Image (cartoon, rainbow, N blue to C red):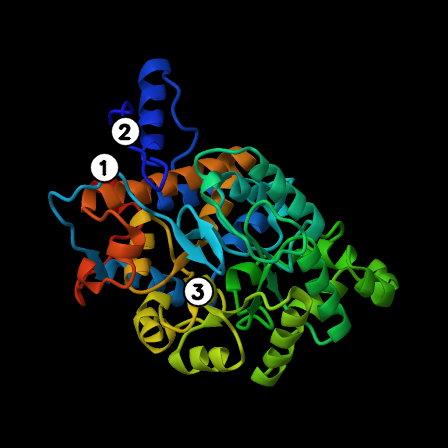
Amino acid sequence: MDPENKPKGPSPHYSLYQREMFKRGGETGILPSFSVHPEELQESTKKKLNDRGYFYANSNAGIGWTDRANREAFYRWRIVPRACVDTNTRDLTTTIFGHKIPVPIMFAPIGINKLYTPLGELVPARVAGELGIPYCLSTAASQSIEDVARANDEGASERNESNSVHEYSGPNGGNAKSPRFFQLYMGHDDEVTLSLLNRAWKAGFDVVMLTTDTWQLGWRPTDINIANYVFYYPGAVGNDVGTSDPVFMAKHGDDIAKDSGKWIDSSVWHGKAHTWEKVKWVVNEWKKISGGRPFVIKGIQNVVDAKLALDAGCEGIVVTNHAGRQVDGAVGSLEVLPEIVEAVGDKMTILFDSGVRTGSDVFKALALGAHAVMIGRLYVWGMAHEGIHGCRHVLKSLLADLDITMTVAGYRSIAQDVHRNKDALRYSPSGVPPGPGDHARL
């Protein structure tokens, strides 16, 4: 891993992060303070969090078969390496919703981040700004929309090879320095919904992502065992988007003072489903607020719904089963990605989420047609260990993993050589994925 005289390409040499860790260990004896092997990382998180934090991050619907299906789907697609390809520079860049970004990876929206680190969502928002990759804020966040925007801009202000790749020339209500999106849990009070959308736009969130698979939480026995619903406990975290909203507080300020679950029960996981007609309404309202910026549906698992999202005026979808946390026994998200890409991949931006753990996983999802990949639990596990340092370490490790995979597998460009290239993969219907800990016995 010669760091000298490396040719300059479209993307930074993220692979050098591996050399940095090797060299630090060899010269000073300083080793990483935790493993980024996904199974070891999840396991070590148990020692860093209390039960509520650990199980909220890791609980799945039912007995966890959908979570398992997500990982099994990745196992069945295998990369076909190429030989003697000039990969001395790699182009990992892509463009989504007008934003040129350095890698096709973004932070998925995850709520209640103060369960994992005291600064909550300020941590991943800042790291996203440092790297120049999109950050998506959850309506169930434990920091306000405006404070998260500031943290994201602070990270982006520290210019480096990675975030200097980001380019965007479209409209933005808050002069954002880094790409950031807002995930909407839509309640049934339109005035509150419009207030959230206006706040997001003014704070520089220029894409809205409506989650459609979580009107209420799925059946999660490991959370039920410990009554793991933090909003009902004294000193509840996760109400911050609501308690900082002037419209919600004007209507319900007295109520939430008496009942800490008022925000989450009425405006987030309210248990009352919306229809595609309501989706059309909120799409139209967002277009009026933002001057026509994109609207994305999160929670697509079949071709019919993908086409309905297109018909509703959406520019993008997220193919996801909420990481196996909503419907147990459902299809793995990667299983349905190819057919959805075939149906709408030329008409919409397709993001992929659920089960992504490694650079190879990112490669596979892109080869099957995703334009970018969202990660969630990985960054939560990282910041559970060491806050911003842990989150940054996990992200830089993932970028190095993807960059090295491209190098050694013989694929130079994401856009030209990987995206929608099924020849880069081979499907194997047989075999059993290794279980937890099996890697240590090989």
Q: Does residue 63 appear anywhere in the picture?
A: no
Residue drawn at x 44%, y 47% is: 378
Q: Is 317 situated above or below 53?
A: below
**N-term mark: 3 or 1:** 1
Label 1: which secondary element = loop
- Farthest residue to the left: give it: 84
Q: Residue beneath label 1, please?
A: 88
417 over 440 or under it: above or below: below
Q: Is residue 196 left or right of residue 136?
A: right
Query: Which residue does the numbered mark 3 point to in the structure image?
Result: 324
- Three-letter code, disc 3: Gly
Measured as percent of width and height from the top left, residue 257 is found at 85, 58
Residue at the spot of label 2: 6
**Mark nearer the N terminus (1 vs 2):** 2
> Residue 223: x percent and y percent?
56, 59
Instruction: Name the kind of residue labelled 1 in the image.
Output: Asn
Q: Determine the image quadrant of residue 324.
A: bottom left
Mark 2 vs 3, N-terminal side:
2
Determine contact: label 3, label 1, CB under 8 Å. no
**Callout 1–callout 2 Cβ contact below 8 Å:** yes
Q: Position of residue 66 (x, y in %)?
A: 39, 67
